[in-house]
């Protein structure tokens, strides 16, 4: 079946304005206090009368200080130099930088600069030493620049409104607030190896548990799935993004609706890949968008332990599995991690036996890394044992289980470090860019028991071809290996 190319339009997800899409509040308004009103349907704050955000940022002062203090232990991987108040410097050589960019000062538009400065001023005022501001300042600057470029590009929110500086600052401070609360201060523990997305109490009996209510506190009604999508969507150039293989995707959806299972074998390029899937699937249809929300992502330890990643992970269906590299890194904890992986496999098998399960997994075990010598971005090789394991689980479930490749181009959205880092707290990069997904034809059941490698090789070959097709469609041929 030939792949079909679909150019994406404005995403169809529904959010409560002006909060969900919001990513950066900012102010040319007169100085003065600001009241914060929480929109419980989304968990994003709205600013009374759109006045300055000083009080909003000060609300997070104590928590941000906590992040900075605890972050000292991993500040080397999360450590940019400070930026001047009137310009943002894109730095390509800091902390194993990830993308070749001109090291030159790029001025933000006045409204975005004002919003950035006010947020940064409140942050700096709360810290005992300027050295502790670096990790959060870098993330703030990256995000403000990305959304300012989105605004200049004429990109819109799902409700048709403009992307604004106030939206950008608001979304960033909300994300930092969630990261502080659930990643450090009142650390959210992913107690189950198979985590179900936290999307608010409606229709979810888990929220009747007082322990969960205590964990979530004032964020009890927050839809963490929508919050994560709202954070990244404005930084995606949706008009120029592409989805290939829509017919294959629709076939997979029909199989899921029939009670069969589908496993997407994907390459993995950025921390925002789950949001990439959601934004692009939403752009096709509401039904396909729901598939993105229902997907279970096979996740490593970092997404449940990194402070800034935790709240985004809370909004996703996860199957928490330690990668082989992570298990072998510490011999003392290897037995416990192996037991957890076995528990995760049993939990996944239970889901597959129920039928109608959809899974996203990156058989490479990590993100694609660019070749620092050539600037090209090859797909990380698939691990045959990983693919074999998912095929085995599918066979043991006794429910038809189908496999598709999912090629992803999202590297420029959140470029990862050029080299794998064992700890958490890596430097966060955010860029305004188009993205792409290609769903290949269903992978045929080839190889049998004697030549299992043929199936894995076919899956990787299909993913590679879709990846090249995407790069050509997006005008990113320079990344083709």
Image (cartoon, helix red, strand yellow):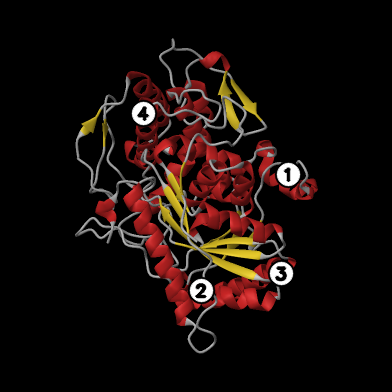
User: Is residue 327 in view?
Assistant: yes
SS assignment at label 3: helix
Q: Position of residue 393 (x, y in %)?
A: 63, 75
Residue 384 falls left or right of residue 99: right
- Residue 143, by quadrant, is top left
Instruction: Give the class, few, some or many, for how many residues have Cα within 10 Å of label 3's Cα (few <14, many ≥20).
Output: few
Disc 2 designates what residue? Answer: 387
Residue 192 falls left or right of residue 57: right
Q: Residue at 63%, 72% (x, y): give it.
A: 345
Disc 4 designates what residue? Answer: 153
Instruction: Give the class, few, some or many, for how many residues have Cα within 10 Å of label 2's Cα (few <14, many ≥20).
Output: many
Disc 1 designates what residue? Answer: 213
User: Are the residues flagged by discs 2 and 4 in contact, CB closer than 8 Å?
Assistant: no
Q: Residue at 40%, 23% (x, y): give it.
A: 115
User: Are the residues flagged by discs 2 and 3 in contact, CB closer than 8 Å?
Assistant: no
Classify 113 as above or below 312.
above
Q: Position of residue 377 (x, y in %)?
A: 30, 58
Disc 3 designates what residue? Answer: 350
How many angstroms separate mark 1 from mark 2 (CA)? 38 Å
Q: Nearer the viewer, residue 90 or 182?
A: 90
SS assignment at label 2: helix
Q: Nearer the viewer, residue 35 or 186?
A: 35
Give the label, 3 or 1, closer to the camera. Answer: 3
- Point out the tag, 2 or 4, that comes first from the N-terminus: 4
């Amino acid at each position: 079946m030939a792949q079909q190319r679909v150019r994406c339009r404005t995403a169809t997800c529904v959010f409560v304005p002006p909060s969900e899409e919001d990513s950066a509040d900012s102010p040319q308004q007169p100085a003065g206090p600001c009241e914060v009103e929480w929109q419980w349907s989304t968990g994003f704050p709205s600013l009374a009368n759109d006045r300055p955000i000083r009080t909003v940022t000060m609300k997070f002062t104590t928590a941000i200080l906590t992040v900075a203090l605890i972050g000292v232990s991993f500040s080397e991987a999360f450590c940019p130099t400070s930026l001047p108040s009137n310009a943002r410097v894109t730095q390509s050589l800091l902390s194993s930088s990830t993308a070749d960019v001109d090291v030159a000062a790029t001025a933000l538009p006045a409204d975005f600069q004002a919003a950035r400065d006010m947020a940064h001023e409140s942050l700096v005022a709360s810290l005992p030493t300027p050295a502790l501001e670096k990790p959060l300042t870098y993330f703030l600057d990256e995000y403000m620049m990305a959304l300012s470029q989105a605004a200049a590009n004429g990109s819109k929110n799902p409700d048709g409104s403009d992307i604004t500086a106030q939206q950008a600052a608001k979304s960033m401070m909300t994300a930092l607030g969630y990261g502080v609360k659930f990643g450090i201060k009142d650390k959210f523990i992913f107690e189950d190896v198979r985590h179900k997305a936290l999307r608010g109490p409606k229709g979810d009996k888990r929220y009747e548990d007082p322990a969960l209510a205590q964990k979530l506190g004032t964020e009890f009604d927050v839809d963490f799935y929508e919050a994560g999508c709202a954070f990244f969507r404005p930084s995606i150039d949706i008009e120029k993004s592409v989805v290939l293989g829509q017919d294959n995707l629709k076939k997979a959806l029909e199989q899921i609706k029939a009670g069969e299972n589908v496993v997407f074998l994907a390459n993995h390029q950025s921390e925002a890949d789950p949001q990439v899937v959601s934004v692009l699937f939403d752009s096709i249809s509401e039904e396909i968008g729901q598939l993105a929300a229902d997907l279970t992502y096979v996740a490593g330890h970092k997404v449940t332990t990194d402070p800034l990643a935790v709240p985004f992970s809370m909004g996703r269906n996860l199957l928490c599995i330690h990668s082989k590299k992570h298990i072998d890194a510490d011999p003392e904890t290897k037995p416990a991690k192996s037991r957890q992986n076995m528990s995760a496999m049993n939990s996944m098998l239970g889901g597959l036996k129920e039928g109608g399960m959809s899974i996203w997994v990156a058989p490479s075990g990590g993100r694609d890394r660019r070749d620092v010598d050539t600037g090209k971005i090859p797909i990380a090789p698939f691990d045959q044992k990983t693919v074999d394991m998912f095929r085995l689980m599918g066979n043991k479930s006794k429910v038809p289980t189908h496999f598709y490749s999912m090629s992803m181009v999202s590297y420029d959205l959140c470029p990862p470090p050029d080299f794998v880092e064992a700890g958490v707290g890596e430097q966060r990069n955010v860029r305004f860019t188009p993205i792409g997904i290609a769903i290949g034809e269903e992978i045929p059941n080839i190889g049998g028991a004697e030549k299992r490698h043929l199936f894995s090789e076919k899956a990787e070959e299909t993913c590679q071809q879709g990846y090249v097709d995407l790069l050509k469609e997006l005008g990113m041929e320079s990344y083709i290996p």
